[in-house]
Image (spheres, helix red, strand yellow):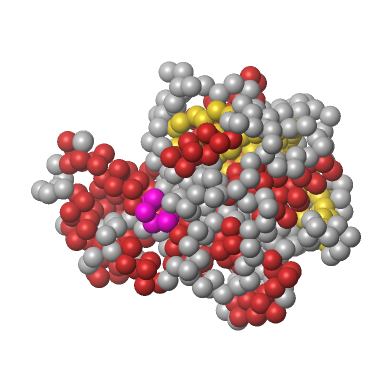
Amino acid sequence: MRRFLLSCSMAMVIFSPSMAAPSANERTPRDTFAACPDEESDAALAGTLCAHFTAPLDRGQPGGDKIDLFVRKFPARDRSRGQVWLVAGGPGESGASFYPLLATLRDSFADLDLLIPDHRGTGFSDRLCPTEEAASSPGGAALDGGEWGSCFGALNAAPQRARAFSISNAANDLRLMIERYRSASPTWVYGVSYGTQLVLRMLQTPPMTPIRGVILDSLVPPEDTDKWDLSHRSFIVDAVGRRALRACGRVRRCNAKFAEPIETVLRRLVDDPATATLVGGDPKQFFGSLLDIPDLRRRIPDIVDGLVREDNTALTQVKEQQSALGALFNRYPQSAISVPLVAIISGSENNARPGLTRKQVATESQSLLFTSNLPALLVDPGLPTYTHDAAFGRLPVSLPPTLVLQGDMDPKTPFEGALAHVARLQSAGTVGLQKIVGAPHYLLLTAPACFTSIVRDFVTTKVVSARPCAPSRSPRS
């Protein structure tokens, strides 16, 4: 199952897991916030407070086995006027995925305490494989070598525990934590990608603490629709990739690089075995991965032109940028994606075609120029999956004011899927969608100027502007 590390996150580009040294002490005082043991290990963590919260392993058995959950608090720089819970994507990402983005988060949620939990199964919360996924294990929090076999073997030997790491149980964790660490001041909730699915699942049974507002970044499609699920991800990626190529065709400086349509040129490249050697893997998946970051997406014509001329300069530069981003987001001991959690939740909740075969995936990919490896990863996950519970496909009965931020070039949670989901959610409350023109997935990362301006206004007014934002200008320019 090592292949899951390549690109399982719904939230952002996934890079190789960090081999950073584990913190000297991952444990903090229980339940109440206290100074974090690792606050001196990284400048971003200075002054943070940590707590470990105990929740039921299964929400249906509150008196049964328990699970330990980790949450980190970044106090407001000045006097706090409330708190915002930041719910990471994935599944499989820990709250550490937010740490490199603290400057944007503090600008966007000024005067609010930032509370960042690690989902069950991730980070410093209890893991599916506590020994193999420990930050102090040989591979760090990532599985390595023989840890793959022992971890997957243990999960298959205890399927009931593995299946307890579900979205609904994770949603119950979030609800209980918000209730426990409630503030007398306003409470906000932000979720990104898979985190939007988790937040909406949590709001089916809202916490006792009133939620002032909800911000959903890169909203997942409705759960009960088929065409936008993970098994169809390559079609979504290809559609966005071809839009990017057509944009090149409309710009003379870009189009002049090619004697024939760029799609024709790229077709020859992705079908050429030599290209796979140059990019270090499946060319279609490589070009698909570039769609996640605007700067990398813009370099696709340069890479194609260079490969045709046997000049790898642009390709090398882009791979160096990817490596730099990987280093930025994987520098914490708990940064590594939890592969077992990805496999269980993706296979159980977001796969509309459980009978999908490798032959079918290969056949569907033949006509595409840009693909994702997710459809193939859903085939025979090798771990216990669970059936949908009663919460699947349901909507919250009521919603606080809700802002949806969506890029119209999102290759993971497509803009059309977000529109369809918002149309349903509007029956539960005031839900507004803010389009970010030309932006991909995870707007906190990929369109920070738009994100900050829009979120600041929403936190102040709870009103969503009808005017789209382009990352190159402010919403009101």
Please say if 246 is above or below 62: above
Does the magenta segment cover residue 369? no
Question: Between 124 and 370, which is closer to the camera in this rendering?
Answer: 370
Residue 438 x %, y %: 38, 36
Query: Magenta region's main secondary structure?
Result: helix
Instruction: Please tell me in which quadrant of the rendered image residue 183 appears.
Output: top right
Residue 412 visible in this rendered orientation of the protein: yes
Residue 349 x %, y %: 58, 57
- Relative placement, left or right, of 187 versus 223 is right
Q: Residue at x 63, y 51 (%)?
A: 392
Residue 204 x %, y %: 70, 42
Considering the image in quadrants, where does the C terminus appear? Answer: top left
Please say if 275 is above or below 42: below
Q: Residue at x 16, y 48 (%)?
A: 261
Please say if 469 is above or below 410: above
**Which residue is situated farthest in the right direction here?**
63
- Relative placement, left or right, of 365 versus 31 is left
Question: Between 48 and 87, which is closer to the camera in this rendering?
Answer: 87
Q: Residue at x 86, y 57 (%)?
A: 62
- Relative placement, left or right, of 102 versus 328 is right
Residue 114 x %, y %: 71, 38
Q: How many marks?
A: 0
Q: Residue at x 86, y 63 (%)?
A: 64
Highlighted range, magenta: 232-237
Residue 336 visible in this rendered orientation of the protein: no
Question: Between 40 and 50, which is closer to the camera in this rendering?
Answer: 50
